[in-house]
């Protein structure tokens, strides 16, 4: 076990090291330039399309439009399913860790990562819809494994297989056991609930959703994600109202220390500019998952025939996750004095909330962490299932769902040091095949986008059938 720990530790240091972060940012910058900053310029249009893409009531759906729709879930619910997997512990613990290790300047580099990542997420969703297939049960399936297979050709099938293997394994860790363990810790520390009981409750609730497939996951995500996201932002805004006098200073710290080293202060150990960049970029990507290839799996199931429209909706996931939710967490932390005491992780966020809202801060963060982690489990169950299906066929789906649900309580009671390390490693390794595909297929993204804004018809691609 010690050898495995050392091996995965060494690999993890490489895949989450400077080279990978440069690769993720580099591909994002290339796509953003190739798209002529369109994801930033058309942000308002993305929100408009998201609102229009909600589930309509049956009476609102014209018969003519229904025939033109392809996919299982509304464009809005596709975004909510993707957000369910990204808005999670990274928004609470990840931001706190970035500040604790990289200083306030890390927040600036999280923002840069998000602005670049919007182009990456847009491109992923465009390719996911463009190259998706219909499996033998009639459901649409897509994501990096399919745009590698159908966009790059069968000679690249090995790369699609690698992505699917990494995704199926990573889902059990980063999207399952790690999440249930985080919730169990928070519930035990805040409310005294035993780990095993938390695990069983999550298993029952998540199982009822996951075993129903993507339509049920999307339906729950479509309701739960907006509620939990808005509630957390409102709680954060209440803290910022209490700490209103410190907001200007917090922004000053973010911009100043993004380019200047920070000396040690209080319990804070100090941070070089490179630390701010490294931890800001790493935690930003960990939170919004732009470039990892997970979100396009959900967007491929959207009820749409236009890949560019879905791309415009998909890019909002990165904006909402990092620019809105992570910024709220960062400002709550930086307007308190707790961040200079040496605290880090979720406890730093909880103590910062509690300083402004005594007696309420800890429960708010514990509940938010629980709901965020629960929806992350739902989103990642779908990602892992589709990766497993790509490797072993449609018949394997129910086996994966059952195994995924059974792993939840095990994660709640286990010591997860090695599992976290392995899952975190595979999570990063998903990005490599995806980034290769994004770079090679970027001309397709640029052409489809240009055609769409020129008013030309943008088709989803050939009728592709899975399991042939």
Image (tube, rainbow, N blue to C red):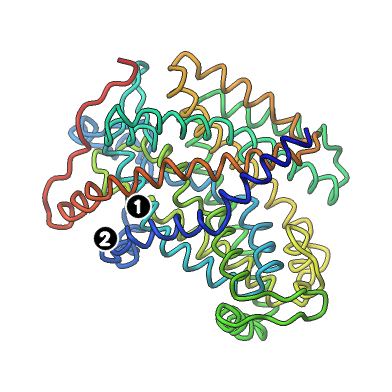
Q: Which residue is pictured at 32% across the width and 49% down the height?
A: 439
> Where is the C terminus found, in terms of image quarters?
top left
| Residue located beneath label 2 in the image | 35
> Where is the N terminus found, in terms of image quarters?
top right
Name above or below for residue 282 compared with residue 441. below
**Image x and y of residue 205, in percent:** 66, 31
At mark 2, the secondary structure is loop
Tag 2 near tag 1, CB within 8 Å: yes
**Image x and y of residue 423, in percent:** 63, 39
Q: In the image, is 226 to the left or to the right of 306?
A: right
Residues 374 and 407: in front is 407
Q: In the image, is 384 to the left or to the right of 364?
A: left
Q: Which residue is pictured at 69% across the width and 27% down the height?
A: 407
- Please rate how many residues cluster around mark 1, counting C-alpha atoms within 10 Å: few if below 14, some from 14 to 19, many from 20: many
How far apart, in angstroms, are the residues tagged by discs 2 and 1?
Answer: 10 Å
Say whether disc 2 or disc 1 marks the residue closer to the N-terminus.
Answer: 2
Residues 194 and 384: in front is 384
Q: Tell which tag, 2 or 1, sits nearer the viewer.
A: 2
Q: Which mark is residue 156?
A: none
Q: Which residue is pictured at 31% across the width and 24% down the height?
A: 134
Q: Quadrant of residue 7?
A: top right
- Please rate how many residues cluster around mark 2, counting C-alpha atoms within 10 Å: few if below 14, some from 14 to 19, many from 20: many
Q: In the image, is 209 to the left or to the right of 117?
A: right
Residues 221 and 271: in front is 271
**Image x and y of residue 61, in percent:** 27, 37
Name above or below for residue 283 compared with residue 397. below
Q: Which residue is pictured at 62% across the width and 47% down the height?
A: 12
Q: Which mark is residue 122?
A: 1
At mark 1, the secondary structure is helix
């Amino acid at each position: 076990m010690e050898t495995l720990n050392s091996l995965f530790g060494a690999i993890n240091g490489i895949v989450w090291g400077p080279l990978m972060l440069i690769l993720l940012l580099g591909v994002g910058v290339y796509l953003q330039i190739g798209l002529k900053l369109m994801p930033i310029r058309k942000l308002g249009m993305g929100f408009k399309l998201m609102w229009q893409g909600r589930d309509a009531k049956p009476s609102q759906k014209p018969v003519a439009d229904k025939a033109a729709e392809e996919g299982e879930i509304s464009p809005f619910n596709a975004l909510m399913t993707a957000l369910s997997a990204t808005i999670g512990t990274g928004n609470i613990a990840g931001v706190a860790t970035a500040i604790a290790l990289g200083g306030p300047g890390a927040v600036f580099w999280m923002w840069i990562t998000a602005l670049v990542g919007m182009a990456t997420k847009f491109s992923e969703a465009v390719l996911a819809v463009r190259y998706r297939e219909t499996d033998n049960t009639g459901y649409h399936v897509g994501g990096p494994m399919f745009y590698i297979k159908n966009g790059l050709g069968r000679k690249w099938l090995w790369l699609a297989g690698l992505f699917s293997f990494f995704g199926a394994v990573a889902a059990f860790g980063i999207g399952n056991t790690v999440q249930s363990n985080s919730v169990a810790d928070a519930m035990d520390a805040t409310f005294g609930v035993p780990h095993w009981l938390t695990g069983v409750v999550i298993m029952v609730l998540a199982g009822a959703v996951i075993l129903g497939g993507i339509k049920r996951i999307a339906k729950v995500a479509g309701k739960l994600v907006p509620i939990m996201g808005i509630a957390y932002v409102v709680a954060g805004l209440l803290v910022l109202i209490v700490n209103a006098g410190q907001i200007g200073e917090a922004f000053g710290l973010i911009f100043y220390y993004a380019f200047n080293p920070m000396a040690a202060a209080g319990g804070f150990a100090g941070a070089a500019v490179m630390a701010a960049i490294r931890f800001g970029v790493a935690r930003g990507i960990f939170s919004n998952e732009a470039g990892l290839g997970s979100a396009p799996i959900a967007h491929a199931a959207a009820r749409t025939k236009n890949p560019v429209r879905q791309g415009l909706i998909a890019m909002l996931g990165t904006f909402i996750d990092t620019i809105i939710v992570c910024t709220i967490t960062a400002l709550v932390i930086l307007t308190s004095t707790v961040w200079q005491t040496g605290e880090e992780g979720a406890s730093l966020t909880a103590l910062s909330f509690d300083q402004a809202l005594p007696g309420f801060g800890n429960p708010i963060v514990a509940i938010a962490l629980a709901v965020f982690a629960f929806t992350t489990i739902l989103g990642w169950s779908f990602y892992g299932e589709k990766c497993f299906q790509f490797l072993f066929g449609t018949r394997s789906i129910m086996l994966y769902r059952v195994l995924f649900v059974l792993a939840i309580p095990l994660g709640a009671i286990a010591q997860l040091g090695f599992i976290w390390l392995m899952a975190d490693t595979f999570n990063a390794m998903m990005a490599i095949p995806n980034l290769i595909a994004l770079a090679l297929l970027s001309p397709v993204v640029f052409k489809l986008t240009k055609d769409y804004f020129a008013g030309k018809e943008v088709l989803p691609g050939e009728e592709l059938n899975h399991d042939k």
